Image (tube, grey):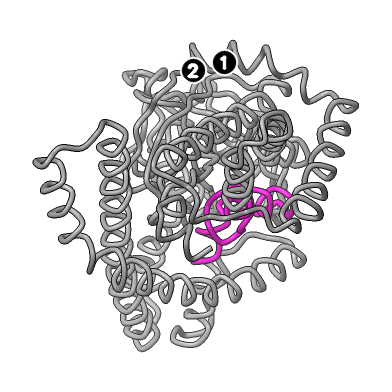
């Protein structure tokens, strides 16, 4: 395998897209932040 | 390469049309694995090749069958590489001696993009509740919900806050803990909003958990089954959280109007801040999925990295590397704008992290812990103990998250330089093919 092919393969691994354009779909984690830090007295005073 | 004996298309493979803005038609392939299902977006032609593996044909015969149906499209050796390097390792095609029900392999970390990921409610709890609440996504109810959102916000920010009745300093420990509790409950409503929207469109196997993302402690809902939905429905799943959370806001407003207790009003404002944060498209929250689904760019963050790598190829490579982003022109333009703004946001985030985490949280952390321990020894009531412990806990989470992010960032920059170096060496090397 040429160095060029090797570098292309390495590119795809952490991108979930391989050299054949097959994409592993990310887990759909729908996040929502809770207010915590902003609720401490310092943040409240700053607000 | 060795000849394979009677490989076949995975009999457990589920396929459906995949709605994205890719440059060619894509099929969603769901492959079972030892853990959760693994999902791939696969060019339509490859799925045709997979189906040529009926268990009776050898690899050569399946390739020949495919080539006869698609003359001149792919070379035989290239197809063989596709099969052995991608379709078989991913479990789309299986060997006769392989357990097809566990053949899927994933390269994603189990915790996804979270630094800490803990499940709280399994799908056997979430699914029935989500199905029960899915009626809330009937159009007339959604319109009413939208109107309530607007009216409640106009009333709070146009009238109540303007009256100058809000004094943040007036909050005692108990009130702060109450706000924390309301915020957590509202966030749980938010997560059930996503799950109920997904259930409305027939998705199952959803779970809810807790985690740390950058410096945020978050709740999450796994709605991976929503990948099978059309983009518009996926977008409804994305806004389903804010929809349900805004109903929680209306409940808080009603409680304030009924009791006059300002804690409900404070909770309204703070939960609103959280909603604003989730709509930021550069954090992997609702805004991120909305942009991804509206414009049909799957794995948006990965595609962003891909886009930068394509540019690196053009600048540092030999110029003959075809682009790795498989998107339409419109999607590529959106991706370019998103990527550039994303870098600006990253720089801003690093400044904020330094300002809040390093200058404020980290520097004051030892003293805070010491003071808490001394107060604890001197005697505190339970409310102060809980309040103090929570303050230390979220600060610790923030420090862990920021440290992890900085380490990850340094590693990424290191890998980027290594890749640029590899590209430069490859560009100088005479072509081996």
**Residue pictured at 35% horizontal, 62% vertical:** A10
Q: Which contiguous range is marked in magenta?
A: B276-305
**Residue pictured at 38% horizontal, 80% vertical:** B423
State yes or no: residue B278 in magenta.
yes
Residue B398: where, in percent of width, then height?
32, 55
- Residue B123's disc is 2
Please indicate, yes or no, whether residue B34 appears anywhere in the rendered image: yes
Position above or below: B147 against B129:
below
Label 2: how many Cα within 10 Å (few below 14, some 14–19, many 20+): some
What residue is pinned by disc 1? B127
Please indicate, yes or no, whether residue B17 appears anywhere in the rendered image: no
Instruction: Report if the CB atoms under discs 2 and 1 are less than 8 Å apart.
Output: yes
Position above or below: B427 against A46:
below
For the residue pair B321 and B381, the one nearer the viewer reads as B381
For the residue pair B339 and B404, the one nearer the viewer reads as B404
Q: Quadrant of residue B66?
A: top right
Q: Main secondary structure of the magenta part?
A: helix
Residue B418: where, in percent of width, then height?
29, 76
State yes or no: residue A45 in magenta.
no
Q: Chain of mark 1?
A: B
Q: Chain of mark 2?
A: B
User: Horizontal placement of B111 versus B135: left or right?
Assistant: left
Please identify the quadrant where the C terminus of chain B is shown.
bottom left
User: Horizontal placement of B23 versus B351: left or right?
Assistant: right
Q: Quadrant of residue B336?
A: bottom right
């Amino acid at each position: 395998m040429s160095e060029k092919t090797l570098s292309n393969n390495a590119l795809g691994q952490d991108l979930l897209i391989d050299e054949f354009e097959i994409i592993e779909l990310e887990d759909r984690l729908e996040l929502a932040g809770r207010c915590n830090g902003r609720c401490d007295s310092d943040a409240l005073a700053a607000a | 390469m060795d000849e394979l004996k009677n490989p076949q298309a995975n009999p457990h493979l589920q396929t459906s049309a995949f709605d994205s803005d890719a440059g060619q038609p894509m099929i969603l392939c769901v492959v079972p694995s030892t853990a959760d299902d693994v999902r791939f977006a696969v060019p339509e032609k490859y799925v045709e090749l997979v189906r040529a593996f009926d268990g009776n044909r050898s690899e050569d015969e399946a390739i020949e069958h495919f080539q006869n149906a698609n003359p001149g499209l792919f070379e035989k050796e290239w197809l063989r590489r596709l099969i052995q390097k991608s379709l078989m390792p991913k479990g789309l095609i299986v060997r006769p001696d392989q357990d097809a029900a566990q053949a899927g392999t994933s390269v994603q970390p189990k915790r996804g993009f979270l630094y800490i990921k803990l499940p709280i409610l399994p799908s056997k709890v979430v699914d029935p509740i989500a199905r029960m609440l899915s009626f809330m996504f009937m159009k007339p109810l959604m319109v009413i919900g939208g109107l309530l959102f607007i009216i409640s916000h106009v009333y709070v920010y146009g009238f109540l806050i303007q009256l100058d009745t809000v004094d943040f300093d007036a909050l005692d420990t108990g009130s702060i803990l109450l706000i924390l509790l309301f915020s957590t409950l509202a966030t749980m409503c938010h997560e059930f909003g996503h799950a109920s929207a997904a259930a409305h469109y027939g998705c199952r196997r959803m779970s809810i958990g807790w985690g740390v993302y950058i410096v945020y402690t978050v709740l999450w809902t796994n709605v991976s089954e929503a990948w099978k939905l059309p983009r518009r429905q996926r977008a409804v799943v994305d806004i389903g959280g804010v929809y349900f959370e805004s109903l929680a806001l209306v409940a808080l407003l009603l409680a304030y109007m009924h009791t006059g207790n300002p804690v409900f009003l404070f909770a309204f404002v703070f939960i609103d801040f959280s909603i604003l944060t989730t709509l930021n498209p550069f954090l992997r929250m609702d805004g991120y999925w909305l942009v991804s689904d509206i414009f049909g760019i799957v794995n948006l963050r990965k595609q962003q990295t891909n886009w930068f790598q394509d540019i690196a190829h053009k600048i540092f490579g030999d110029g003959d590397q075809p682009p790795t982003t498989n998107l339409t022109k419109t999607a590529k333009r959106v991706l370019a704008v998103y990527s550039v703004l994303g870098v600006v946001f990253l720089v801003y985030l690093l400044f904020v992290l330094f300002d809040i985490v390093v200058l404020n949280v980290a520097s004051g952390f030892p003293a805070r812990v010491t003071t808490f321990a001394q107060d604890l020894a001197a005697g505190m009531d339970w409310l102060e103990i809980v309040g103090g412990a929570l303050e230390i806990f979220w600060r610790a989470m923030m420090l862990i998250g920021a440290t992890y992010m900085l380490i990850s960032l340094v590693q990424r920059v290191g890998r980027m330089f290594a890749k640029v170096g590899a590209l430069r060496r490859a560009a100088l090397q005479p072509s081996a093919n």
